[in-house]
Amino acid sequence: MPDKQLALWYKQPANNWFEALPVGNGRLGGMVFGGTGRERIALNEDTLWSGEPRDTVRYDAERHLEPVRRLIFAGRHEEAEQLIEQYMEGSEIESYLPLGDLELLFEEEGDITEYRRELDLEEGLVRVRYRRGGVLHTRELFISAPDQVLAIRLSSEGKLNVTAQLHSPLQFSARKSGSRGVGISGRAPIHVLPNTVKSPEPVQYMEGRGISFGMELQAVVDKGRVEASGGRLHISGAGTVTLLLTAATSFNGFDQDPARNMRDPEALCGEWLAQAGMLGWESLKQRHIGEYSALFKRVDLRLGSAQRDLPVDERIQAVKDGADDPALAALFFQYGRYLLISSSRPGSQPANLQGIWNDKMRPPWCSSWTANINVEMNYWPAEVTNLAECHQPLFDFTRDLSVTGCKTASVHYRSRGWTAHHNIDLWRTSTPVDGSPSWAFWPMAGAWLCQHLWEHYAYSLDEAFLRQAYPVLQGAALFCLDWLVETPDGYLATCPSTSPENYFLTEDGQKSSVTYGATMDLALIRDLFAHCIEASLILDRDETLRKQWEQALEKMLPYQVGQYGQLQEWSQDFAEHEPGHRHIAHLVALHPLNQITLHGQPDLAAACRKTLERRLEHGGAHTGWSCAWTISFWARLCEGEKAQHFVHELLAGMHPNMMNAHRHPKVKLNIFQIDGNFAGTAGIAEMLLQSHDAAIQLLPALPPQWTSGQVRGLRARGGFTIGMEWEDGQLLHAEMVSEAGQACRLRTPYPVDILQDGRILEADRSEPGITVFATAVKQRYEIVPRRP
């Protein structure tokens, strides 16, 4: 097994799920433990959820809306909060479930030597190699997107004797499937209570209802025997073994009953296995590598030396002990891209709180889509790291929500358009769930999800995509128009309003979360209105609506600076109940939006800096995802060393398998949340390239620890693909390809020459610090600094 520069490798098998290595094709996922006598692969299928389509709308919610608003404007925040919780919220969402395990039991004897387990990021493969009693055993596996199977190759210098068996924590029955195959069929619960709810019966089944599933396993051997019985295959006397596994569910759409209007899981499994079996191992492997690598190899990042002599768990421990490891940051960056490719593909569900990897019947926060920050974070790296195709499931998800969200907007709030709230499941639940309004009541998810639709357009300038996305954008903006109300001071603001999961102290010292005009609300609405205005101009439609959006923008409550010089989180300068709170939601205007920039609004940027400093002084950014977001905040403020500090903190807090650890002072469980991986990858990209402030900026937040390096394949808004090389902290040169033929605006602290085929092009340098030059589609341009 050759050493790989881009690999997570270890000297021992995984002892637990947080040490296992993930594989996936967007739909199927597996966690590979790499055991010797016993191998466990924990499996998932992205549509295996509890529940069925249901009406969660609360039909009496709207009649309480005006009383709540009156209480808020009268300063009676606690009473308003109680009214919302009692009369304006709904039921819990459903849960993402584990499919089961493939277990391999090996009949081997002797001591283990020369053990190595690795995840090869360049080819999307897991490999295991060891000697037992001097005999070499190897294992290689992947999950194929082209062929929709988990493929495993077992090899030995001696004879292979192995038993393969399927398990599931769900209700299931096992069966023989031909002479060399086995399968299981089962059904998901109709309801699973969140893991925070105490109940004697948290997992509830109902005969004939809910999602059904099937999982099939087949073996191909070069010689030896295969015996199938129940859920087991026993293989004896083989030199090599190929195992093919796939799974499917009856889910056929968020609005379809999976027990009636269903897909046939067994038929789908049989079709995929038959096609994969005809291809054979080598063809399956090459098809997988070719398809996967075409995505992954678009971007290359080098930071410092590779340090291939140490396994990843030891490198993480060294970082915890204070060591700098820029190459580990580069590996983490590429691992984030690998995880996105593996958990989000066209036609799949979008990556949830754990991507697609979950082994718990009652996972943390239902392993759902948490739309007040986490699902958005999952897709921050999609465009900039050249994985736009992986963004597609989120667009489909948002379009689905625009359907369910119409009823929620109309019934709950007497509004046009569509809305969605903080917790969303497979059934596209758009209503508020039960719980504290600080997190349960937040009807801004639609506005934020629409930002991703616009980002895809901003990076691609694909007008056909914008035309398809516009009705969804327009619907979210219609809701926001109706949701805004006039404040006592004559401004437009949201009411009721919360800043996700945070609380303030009222004048009489009471803790509350409900007010009007939370800064995050207004930032998201400003962003949505501005994009809708621009889209309507590009598409030449909705002139009347455009004027309404323009007028609303002029009347909206402005950003405000509080008593400490900080950007205010709420419309009033309330004292914070928890000054070090993990959410820094009001800085969404700084990142990922572009409403507050260093060059455009320096005073507000300074207020954002003060907000960050105060949060961090009081212990903020203590969870993985919050730490990851802080990287991008500092990067937008061009503070490379501070951004790198939080890269270091994120790396030091990872699980041994480099998955983000969500550790919270009030939560004793050791939890995985994938948003920290994705937001961390996006944060590193933000340190190297920015294009949000009407110009492209190269190396805007390069820390001194990354003194030399190179990157290739990053994307910038306006349809540009960029590569750079730097040394001693200074740009040596950059290359750029224009995919859309737009003029390029480049912001640099020093003059640059623009070359094409070695010829210096004419450029406009009339604006200080900005170089503007014309580009042609697919042409390559070189950017060379002019230094004395």
Image (tube, grey):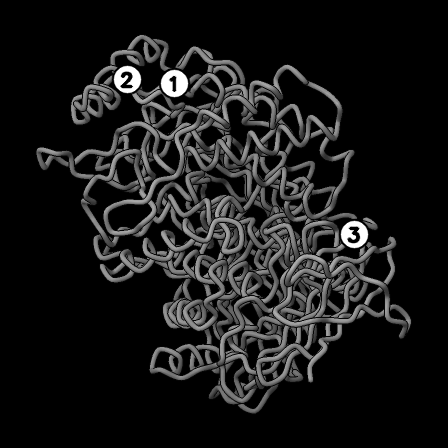
Could you tell me residue 523's position as x and y percent? 45, 37
First reached walking from the N terminus: tag 1 or tag 2 = 2
Relative to residue 730, is residue 362 drawn left or right? left
Residue 236 image point, x, y percent: 62, 69
**Quadrant holding the C terminus:** bottom right
Which residue position is annotated with label 2? 69
**Secondary-structure class at tag 2:** helix
**Can you tell which of label 1 and label 3 is closer to the viewer?**
3
Amino acid type of the residue that numbered disc 3 sits on in the rendered structure: Ala
Q: Which mark is residue 743?
A: 3
Closer to us: 211 or 104: 211
Q: Nearer the viewer, residue 491 or 643?
A: 491
Query: Could you tell me the amino acid type at mark 2?
Result: Arg
- Whether pointer 1 and pointer 3 mark residues with C-beta atoms closer than 8 Å, the reply is no
| Residues at marks 1 and 2 touching, judged by CB atoms closer than 8 Å | yes
**Is residue 712 positioned above or below 178 on the image?**
below
User: In front of the other: label 1 or label 2?
Assistant: 1
